[in-house]
Image (cartoon, coloured by chain):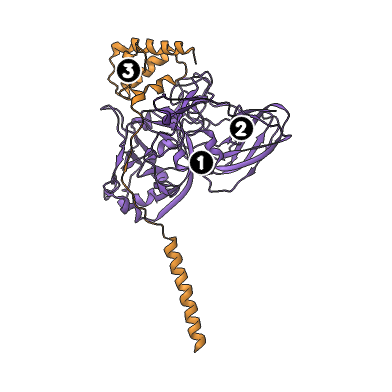
Chain colours: A purple, B orange
Amino acid sequence: MIDRRHFLALAAAGAAAPALAQRVVDLGLPGGPSDRTLTSAWPGKGEMIVQRLRPPLLEAPMSVFDGALLTPNDRHYVRWHWPFPTEVDPSTFRLRVGGHVKTPLALSLADLQRLPRYEIVAVNQCAGNSRGLFQPRVAGAQWAHGAMANARWSGVRLRDVLDLAGVRAGAVQVRASGMDEPSVAGAPDFAKSLGIDHARDGEVMLAFAMNGEALPLLNGFPLRLVVPGWYATYWVKMLDSLEVLATPDTGYWMAKAYMMPANRAAHVAPGTKDFAKVPISRMVPRSFITSVADGAVVDWRAQLPVGGIAFGGDTGVARVDVSGDGGRSWVAARLGADGGRHGFRRFDGVVPAARGLAVLMAQCTNTAGEVQSMQFNWNPSGYQRGVVEVTRVRLV
Amino acid sequence: MRIWWQAAAFLGLIAGVMALSVVVRRPTVMAFSPVRVELPDGAMSTSFGGSDSGIVDGNCLACHSADFVRGQPVLTAAEWTAEVAKMRKVYKAPIAEADDAAIVAWLVAMQERRGGG
């Protein structure tokens, strides 16, 4: 079994509360601080890494991704900008649809369920996933790789909801906002906008179920936007407002926050402050070795199995190659079942290995031909990490 | 005559199976129960701890818990100053500008005590 170097200690929260004993995990963040608390104290959640208590940022440990391809709901990461209701009555919940439409609506969950059902498997990944691994380090949520999850989303197409209200000519965007609210008056309410054609592409959807069950409250009960292939900042939780816009959204969350360098790799030379920016959007291909943990000590085998998960970003996985020698030589991995182009894909390969330190890598190529770079990308917000990740193990 | 009855029964069976499959294929209407949770975010997020943390307790914790600040990588005084300014200007935190220097000094000292990570 894997020697989990990173699980440093069993740190009791206090002698008075042994039932709430918490473990500490070392996320390996360069330069630190790297220790975080692991806890199962959050409603509807199993053991999660606490990045922030309030408003909550909860990360999944990497071991979660070596299990079922669909991330269990109780291990789906949590990320809130503002406080949100802790009590939701689905019978009185209404989704308001307004703005540049013919008929403003207030839809109940029952109303929504009268529309054609739509389902898709898609990866939900925070724009800042893996920010804590940026070098030079940048301020913000110091995620390792666990601000991502793969789920089967059930609900209705955004297009069908918009058609119910009747989008008027001249509409350019749809702005989505949820029940979370700023803790200070005058601070920017969280809202994100999609181009009208994107909103109506038949894939963007409103999900009321995740893996066949109602959404956990911490993941947006009772309704959230799902934007397959795009970063989770657009996947507005506790969605209760859709506003069709006739002029582009110039609000804080679209025009100031979540801006990245205006190139596909989201890269500028470290330290650069002035550069052309665009709103973050499509994800890039990524892959993670999960069969063995970084820093593990494992029994030597001449042919070392290396497995994990990959996703293609905004399209499917074409191939994954694995290396046991830090990228000098590569071997094609076998791909697991294809659950849809927006979901995780399992890969399993075998690399030749010598005793001692082995530097393992996986490299995903998506169906559009985009290949994970061997060079890290950097930007001051810590967005869109896409580099080939390194897993160092000792073979004894 | 009998063959016709058999054929009719057979067709009926097919129709029945098809109807059943339509019913089965129709998505189940989900029933949603009210949800109420308690977040374990209180006790551990009301103070940065230590006798000198009043300046950050009073200015920072209304919006977010202390762990988020403690978990940041080493930032320079200028970077911390920019963070405090962002909290005031963008997120409308009621932080008096007169407090900025003391807040930043506490943050820098906190990271120095930590030994740079």
Circle 1 crowding by C-alpha within 10 Å: few under 14, some 14–19, many from 20: many
Type of residue at label 3?
Asp
- Amino acid on which the number 2 mark rests in the picture: Ile
Q: Would residue A252 appear left or right of A9 to someone viewing this image?
A: left
Numbered label tally: 3
Q: Mark 3 lies on which chain?
A: B
Residue occupied by mark 3: B57
User: Residue A306: horizontal and vertical position, in percent?
Assistant: 65, 37
**Spatial CA span between label 1 and label 2:** 33 Å
Task: Using the image as rendered, state which of residue B51 and residue A75 is in the foreground.
Answer: B51
Q: Which mark is residue A314?
A: 1
Corner quadrant of residue A241: top left
Q: Residue at x 53, y 46 (%)?
A: A341
> In the rendered structure, the residue with mark 1 lies on which chain?
A
Which label lies toward us, 1 or 3? 3
Q: In this view, does B52 lie above or below A125?
A: above
At mark 2, the secondary structure is loop
* Rendered image: mark on residue A29: none
Whole-number angstrom distance, CA of label 2 to CA of label 3? 41 Å
Residue corresponding to mark 2? A2
Can residue A369 be seen here? Answer: no
Please say if the residues under marks 1 and 3 sit with CB atoms less than 8 Å apart. no
Answer with the quarter of the image where residue B102 lies: top left
Badge 3 marks a residue whose secondary structure is helix
